[in-house]
Image: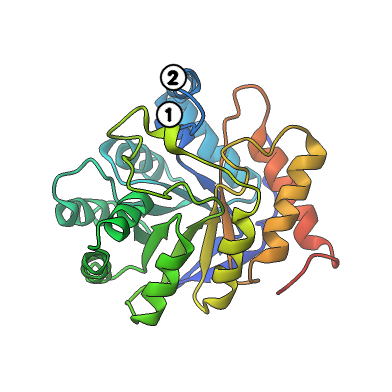
Amino acid sequence: MATTQQMLPTIELGKHQVTRLIIGGNPFSGFSHQNAQLDREMIEYYTMPRLQATLDECWRQGINTVQSRGDRHQMRMFLEYRLRGGQMQWIAQTASEFANIYANIAQIASYEPIAIYHHGTHTDNSWHSGQIDAVADIVKAIKDTGRPAGVGTHIPEVIEYAEEHEWETDFYMGCFYNLARAYKSAPAVERDAYQADQFPAADPERMTAVLRQVPKPCLGFKILAAGRNCADEQTLEATFRYAFDHLKPTDAVVVGMFPKYSNQVAQNAGLVRRILDDPATSTV
């Protein structure tokens, strides 16, 4: 059995301590943001026993939080994990395919995540359709569950708008790449949604500049451009270093992991541990 590592450095999210590396749940549900073939490979790999084993490995490597969709599949995953004594914390995302988002929030809350946030693609489509203020009401509904409420987005201006209008947000999920330059479907409801994805090299600079100005905790996601910034160990390390150099010390990163071919959990946790222990790492 692998020896449990010391917990990675943490940030505060509500009353909870969350490691600055969080495992993201897109691969768990087969959302690669690359192509349908990889989606299928992820689905076939991530059986329930392997999902449980991955969460166990996260804990062993010093990661204490998972972020994933608040759908029935992921609720079941977390329920089984907790029933057998697992200690990982869950940050839940609302699920776009549910017809009633308020009912979805209530059901998610019954599985006791430490925080809930509104799905980024739905947020962004509300922005493009001129209905962004409706998201503020959803944030209030999340707050009513007694948990920290967040907003996910791929658009930096959405975060600026929410802050300017004093939404009741406790944290933000900010994508390093703007995958929502126009109205788009979520992968959960349209399998060709990836065709609209773009990963311009200039995007992370814009998003991180906004996240640094927000006093609340921010969780940066898709820092690896959905696996595109993983060509070799040097590129991987440079990408992680960029993220931590350009986020606040009170921020964290969310990274999806697919350990079919290598132990990405151990690799990423070890890399983050080394970067955060490095006095040269910026604390902007």
Nearest the eye: 248 or 120: 120
49 to the left or right of 261: left
Residue 104 in view here: yes
Vertically, is 193 above or below 224?
Answer: above
Q: Percent x, y for residue 282?
A: 77, 69
Q: Residue at x 27, y 65 (%)?
A: 132
Q: Amino acid at mark 2?
A: Arg
Q: Residue at x 67, y 63 (%)?
A: 9
Residue 112 in view here: no
Vertically, is 208 above or below 65?
Answer: below
Of label 1 and label 2, which has the lower sequence position?
Answer: 1
Q: Quadrant of residue 229?
A: top right
Nearest the eye: 40 or 194: 194
Nearest the eye: 222 or 128: 128
Q: Percent x, y for residue 195?
A: 44, 31
Nearest the eye: 52 or 106: 106
Q: Quadrant of residue 192?
A: top left
SS class, disc 2: helix
Circles 1 and 2 in contact, beta carbons < 8 Å: yes
Q: Amino acid at mark 1?
A: Gly
104 to the left or right of 269: left
Q: Percent x, y for residue 236?
A: 74, 42
Instruction: From the image, tell me which residue sits under label 1.
Output: 30
Q: Which mark is residue 40?
A: 2
Q: Percent x, y for residue 157?
A: 44, 67
How many other residues sit within 10 Å of disc 1, few (<14), some (14-19) or many (≥20)? many
